[in-house]
Image (cartoon, rainbow, N blue to C red):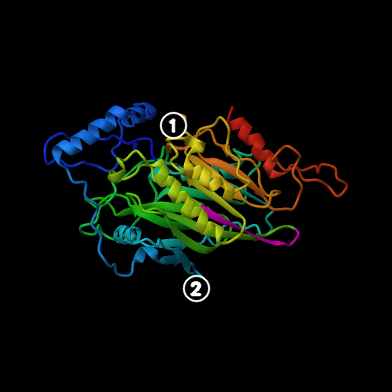
Amino acid sequence: MTSDSWLVISAITNHGSAIASDELRSSPGREPGAILDRIISFRALTVILSTTVAAGCVLAQATVPETASPATCRGLVTDIEERRATSMAWHELVDRRGRLAMAESCAAVGPAVYAERRRNAVTHDRVDELAILSWNAHVGGGDIVGIVNALRRGEFTGGEPVRNFVVLLQEAFRTGAIVPRTPAGVSIPRRIEAFPPKGPRQDIVQTARALGLGVFYVPSMRNGADGGSAAEDRGNAILSTLPLVNFAGIELPFERQRRIAAVATVTGIDTAGNPWHLRLVSAHLNATASVRRLWVFSSGVRGRQAKHLATVLASEDVPTVMGSDLNSWAGGASEPAVTELLPHFPQTSIPVGQSTFRGGRMLDYMFLRVPSVWASEVRTIDDFFGSDHRPLISWIHLRKEEPVVGNSVFVPTSAAGDAAPDRSMAARLLEGALRINR
């Protein structure tokens, strides 16, 4: 959810009027919380209901075809120099209404894409620690290059450079000929065209190439009609310094907009020679409900989406980290979306007293289901890097070491049981997090 996409409901009182716009942007400088409070007040809802009845309006559902041709949006294209087969699992909805709505939206976006990291990029074969960063990149407004370079320099880890990491992105965008022209008769979300504070606005594939990272991108919806502008779609992405495998897309219960969670697995070998794997998920839930739910009653929608996502992911018991923008503006960590997911991710820690969205709201979460000795605390980074969301950062510690009692930060020990002279990266992460959150 973006800082200028807080809902403004327009109750139009003339006969034959229509309810316009799916999600109008608020004026710059206005407080989102104040706008939201006015929207969901009883008086505002009464005006909407009375106006709709008086005008005799019929709030029509979007029309969708009874059948759909094979959809390119469920395909996967690769940019792999070594020609080998790469497939993608697709978890489709089972209800007829959801499937038809998804089919219509599917025609407006391109296929998923996986591009391997640059061949001359530095690789590290033995990996014991992995940084995880999750962030809503605001459809081009977030400075992805800037935050990745800051991570590499060690700005979030007490000055220790970070070599191995993944970035779980929401609101990434993609442009180019691979995105189809706007299909006729299809409802298209409004374009969000934000610009980073430094450098040009680059799509996710271009950004990954510039950084020498692998990227898996799954579009959720189109980013506005063509209208003289380059065709774009937007969705979720995973960037990685390490190889990605086992690609999948999970369709979320449909409400106003098509939402697809991106899933991939990162693999490696630790310094003891033990192979490891970690499933990664990037997900983004609805900000608002549809007209038939009067827009604002959306926490239940997000709860259903979260429950469906948790059910699909629970079908395979593997270590998992999910970065997400849950859009939990109505209740924060007490919203159904959060409470549905927490039991499935027992190593999750929610930053206390911190916010991820302008206006002091907690919308973004990182969920962990990993061996307890792998996990560390999740922290917010106190810089927006051009987005309207703060990033979250955590650390996966892949060696089987015991955590310090009463603390989720891990300290390596020697064979004699004494603290090893080198601090773990998780400890440096905490040091960096404390520094940047002062």
Q: Looking at the image, which is closer to me, 49 or 257?
A: 49
Magenta span contains residue 37? no
Q: Is mark 2 on a helix, strand or loop?
A: loop
Q: Which region of the structure is painted magenta?
A: 272-281
Q: Looking at the image, which is closer to me, 259 or 336?
A: 336
Residue in view at x 64 percent, y 49 percent: 396
Task: Give the prevailing secondary structure in the magenta stretch.
Answer: strand
Tell me: residue 331, above or below residue 239: above
Mark 2, Cα crowd under 10 Å, few <14 / some 14-19 / many 20+, is few
Q: Quickly name the residue at label 1.
A: 358
Classify residue 261 as left or right of residue 57.
right
Q: What element carries label 1?
A: loop
The alpha-carbon separation of the residues under discs 2 and 1 comes to: 43 Å
Residue 212 visible, this angle? no
Q: How many marks?
A: 2
Q: Looking at the image, which is closer to me, 75 or 119?
A: 75
Q: Position of residue 182 (x, y in %)?
A: 25, 57
Farthest residue, direction bottom: 84
Q: Looking at the image, which is closer to me, 437 or 68?
A: 68
Q: Quickly name the residue at label 2.
A: 85
Q: Position of residue 369 (x, y in %)?
A: 61, 51
Magenta span contains residue 277? yes
Q: Position of residue 128 (x, y in %)?
A: 69, 53
Q: Quadrant of residue 41?
A: top left
Looking at the picture, which amino acid does disc 1 mark?
A: Arg
Mark 1, Cα crowd under 10 Å, few <14 / some 14-19 / many 20+, is some
Classify residue 27 as left or right of residue 167.
left
